[in-house]
Image (cartoon, rainbow, N blue to C red):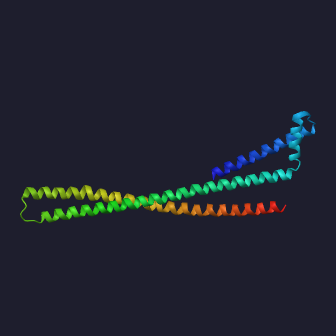
Amino acid sequence: MRRSTFITIIICLVVLAATTGLVRAQTAAQSGGAGPAGAATNSLNNQTENPAALLQQLAEEVKKLRFEMQKLQLELQRVKVAQLKHDLQQMQTDKRRLADQESENDQDITGLDEQLSQPTLSAEERAELEMAKAELVKKGLEKLRAEQQQTSQQETETNQQLEQEQQRLQELTEKVRKLEATAGKGKAEVKKR
């Protein structure tokens, strides 16, 4: 929004500067310039005798600039949406990886439980296996679940952002279509004249 306001202000200043320059050129031409400078001024005067045509030409240039600006915004929005989609795919890959790791940890815990169920274990071996199981549960599963929760939260936020950006993309696409239609009508009217 700020960028479009800034561009509009610049365009208005350019139009104002051009109009001021034309008025000065007409004033100089009316004061009767002679020689090569006078000829150039007279040529400029001939081109600018019809201020309505000049104003129409400037308006067309402003429309073209607006159209180009909207097309650039549309392209940037497409890139944003593509990046968000890529980020979502990466998050889904991370979720699968974390699920695989959790499955491996569950299998390791099951293996330790099977070993612990054997009656032939010595007290020392049993204590070591129970410590290994406790560590695996504490560090492995808790860490994985925390990562899964963080990834799920990021995925939810990214999905919401993607929906917003896709809606913005749709709005920009409509604006560009309307500007194209307007530009097409304007060209047809100019050709009729």
Q: Quadrant of residue 152?
A: bottom left
**Identity of the residue drawn at 74% across and 48% down:** 12
Q: How many marks?
A: 0
- Vertical arrangement, residue 157 with respect to residue 23, above or below: below
Q: Residue furthest top?
A: 35
Image position, residue 40 (x, y; %) = 86, 38
Q: Quadrant of residue 117?
A: bottom left
- Vertical arrangement, residue 172 with respect to residue 9, above or below: below
Residues 160 and 102: in front is 102
Q: In the visual, does 154 lie left or right of 3?
A: left
Image position, residue 73 (x, y; %) = 61, 55
**Identity of the residue drawn at 86% across and 47% down:** 47
Image position, residue 14 (x, y; %) = 75, 45
In what quadrant of the picture does the C terminus appear? bottom right
**Identity of the residue drawn at 87% across and 42% down:** 43
Q: In the visual, does 138 lie left or right of 18?
A: left
Q: In the visual, does 91 lie left or right of 182?
A: left
**Identity of the residue drawn at 86% across and 40% down:** 25
Image position, residue 102 (x, y; %) = 28, 62
- Vertical arrangement, residue 130 with respect to residue 30, above or below: below
Residues 166 and 25: in front is 25
